[in-house]
Image (spheres, rainbow, N blue to C red):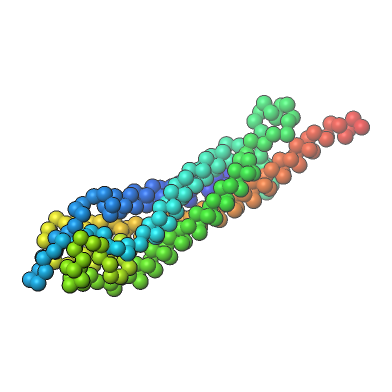
Amino acid sequence: MAPPTFWTLFPPCLLLSCLGVVELGLLSSIVSYIHLQGPRVWQISSEQYNFPLDRIPAHLHLDAGHVSNAAAGLGFFLGLLGMYIAFRERRHVSPLRSGQPYVLVPNEAFRQQSQKIAFGTPTPIFAIFTTFAVLEFLLAMAALIYSFVYDHMTAGNTISLARASQEVGQHYTEHNWAPATWFTAVLALPLVSQSDRNVITNHIHVMKASKWMLVPIYIVAFTVMVAGIFGFKQNRRARRASDERWLQNSRGPGAKGM
């Protein structure tokens, strides 16, 4: 029978690692498109204007992406550590009789030697996991708030053709932009290339998916944080119970001899 720590840690940690991998993949696609892929300019053509528009504005804010990347990366590795702890607890923690707490059980060789050695997860490792679980929760919350709030703040921005035509060879300087709002504004312009329009549309979908992926990451990060705190308390309780049982076993024969 697996201890409760296993079931409280393993499922959310597995899910957090999976969500982290997906979010990292989406963010990598966005960063690659913004900085590496595609043409350096888009050709704009209308009845009054015909000019190349630089694909990156002067005030493109990527801080939300950096925070999201940190939350996704930490979530992935934190999930791996949590799964390691869960399997370690499952292997080395066993229940006593019904109604008694779970305690750390040494393997048979050490039990025969009556040595005070517990093979559960060391308390410092559990403390480190719990600390980083709290940090992951805060990062996920910051990324979620930053992404949604800044997208909302810049959602009404538009690109002026008159101004853009005067800034040929420069980054577009008007307004602050989030990646999704900038590319959405570009789609409202008369782009010459239909293929450019299709590529931009696809990457806007990726940006929206990345933003909404932060919602389950935030929820699961909270679950992992709670599970980490619960597991840390269980770990300390199990170690105390293991120590008490070892003391009782070691003092029993001696007490009778005295």
- Would you identify the image quadrant in which residue 164 lies? bottom left
Q: Position of residue 46 (x, y in %)?
A: 10, 69
- The residue furthest right is 258
Residue 62 can be seen, yes or no: yes
Q: Is residue 94 left or right of residue 19?
A: right
**Image point (38%, 47%), residue name:** 21
Q: Is residue 102 left or right of residue 80?
A: right
- The residue furthest left is 47
Front residue of 32 and 174: 174
Residue 180 can be seen, yes or no: no
- Would you identify the image quadrant in which residue 254 lies? top right
Front residue of 13 and 66: 66
**Quadrant into which the N terminus falls:** top right
Position above or below: 218 against 47: above
Position above or below: 138 against 13: below
Position above or below: 1 against 149: above
Q: Position of residue 258 (x, y in %)?
A: 92, 32
Front residue of 112 and 226: 226
Q: Is residue 179 left or right of residue 20?
A: left
- Would you identify the image quadrant in which residue 216 lies? bottom left
**Image point (42%, 62%), residue name:** 144
Q: How many marks?
A: 0
Q: Is residue 136 left or right of residue 111?
A: left
Front residue of 212 and 113: 212
**Image point (57%, 51%), residue name:** 130
Q: Position of residue 110 (x, y in %)?
A: 69, 28
